[in-house]
Image (spheres, rainbow, N blue to C red):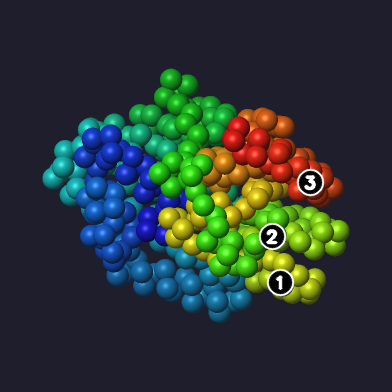
Amino acid sequence: MAGKSGAAIHIRSFARALADLGHEVAIVTCGPPDGKQALEEELHAVIWSAPLSPWNRALAQSFRAANLAIGRTPRRNPDAVRVLHNLTFFKAATRAAKQLSPDFIYERYSLWAMAGLGLARKCSIPLVLEVNAPFAYEQQHYRAGVTCPPPARWVERMIWRKAHLVVPVSESLHSQLRTARVKPERIHVLPNAVNTRLFHLGLDGTPVRQGLNLEGRFVIGFVGTFKRWHGVDLLLSAFRELHRADPSIHLLLVGDGPLRSQFEKEVQNAGLIQAVTFAGALGHEDVPQYVAAMDVAVAPYPALDNFYFSPLKLFEYMAAGRPVIASRVGQVAEVIADGVTGLLFAPGDLADLVRCIARLRNSPALCTELGQNA
């Protein structure tokens, strides 16, 4: 929860928002206690750490070593490690509950996470379960895979059905919860949002533009993880076409991920190393100034069979008053009114993305209008 991922940012923001509303907040996390005091002061919350036990950590290391030995990409925590960690997590959560007597448990659902449900039953405390993804599906299709998919799906649906209230972040997830036979009265859709203390119309991107030597450039920007379902490859292809016609444009990429080295190599091979900035993964408090330095902000998601996301970047772009170009998929198409609060393009359509960027490049007035409306 102390990291730079969207999940970590959302957990911290949600906890702080609860505290700001006057609630007493205690957080039980798998993270180690490093920086615990500073995080408690930032979030106005008490933090209980439940890191992997020594024997479970040894098991995880053994799995990683075995995968490396047979040439497989090692996973951070294999399924067996995740399942067994429920014991450690449950003990820490039980100690916290006994000391604090909470009114309810709010859990961000993750694969194989059964401790929250166990605690709710043991202590007769309502469990509110936030669902950001069908992780049995996501782990199998987009990440390192699942050792036993059928049990993973069964456990996932069991947890969904037994929670007192389930909070999916999109209508797509709402549909999947209904398919899993979660009672409709227990489901409340609540999309992700934005911290307006950080992202707002008063941001000044001038220091970032000056520091990166972007004065006089038309800056196309992206914030996110360099994974295949974020569509950065399409954005790079569009930028190559646009740069041939207009060398004054610049691409600013904020984030990191497994595809970064591949993208950097592509940029170098295309002779665009001076026209593309890889800013890397930034602290969340530093991201707003980089977004403010963008003339247009892009969310180029590809066409996916199951688009259930509620993209944080979309709301952050909009709150900062940036004109947004996004693919017409899932919740993105529900949030962006095409031609009013942003421009939508067909997912995966290179020509359509190029057309949208060129349209804003040639119309500063439209950029301003879309940003203000957003």
Instruction: Give the mark, 1 or 2, whose residue is nearer the N terminus.
Output: 2
Q: What residue is pinned by disc 3?
A: 362
Q: Are marks 2 and 3 in contact (CB under 8 Å)?
A: no
Q: Does residue 364 appear left or right of residue 193 in this picture? A: right
Residue ID at (75%, 55%): 234
Neighbourhood count class around disc 3 (C-alpha, 10 Å): few under 14, some 14–19, many 20 upward: few
Say whether residue 47 is visible. Answer: yes
What's the mark number on residue 274? 1
What kind of residue is marked 3?
Asn
Residue at the top extreme of this rendering: 185
Instruction: Give the mark, 3 or 1, whose residue is nearer the N terminus.
Output: 1
Which of label 2 and label 3 is nearer to you? Answer: 2
Given residues 121 and 296, the one toward you in this image is: 296
User: How far apart are labels 1 and 2 at the CA level?
Assistant: 14 Å
Q: Tag 3, which secondary structure?
A: loop
Q: Tag 2, which secondary structure?
A: loop
What kind of residue is marked 1?
Gln
Q: What residue is pinned by disc 2?
A: 216
Residue 36 higher or lower than 193, as above or below: below
Q: Residue 158 placed where, x, y %?
A: 44, 37
Viewport quadrant of the N terminus: bottom left
Res 252 quadrant in image: bottom right
Which of label 3 and label 1 is nearer to you? Answer: 3
Q: Residue 241 placed where, x, y %?
A: 83, 58
Residue ID at (65%, 39%): 368
Say whether residue 79 is visible. Answer: no
Given residues 264 and 304, the one toward you in this image is: 264
Q: Residue 288 placed where, x, y %?
A: 50, 52
User: How far apart are labels 3 and 1 at the CA level?
Assistant: 22 Å
Q: Residue 289 placed where, x, y %?
A: 51, 55
Residue ID at (45%, 55%): 284
Q: Does residue 294 appear left or right of residue 250 in this picture? A: left
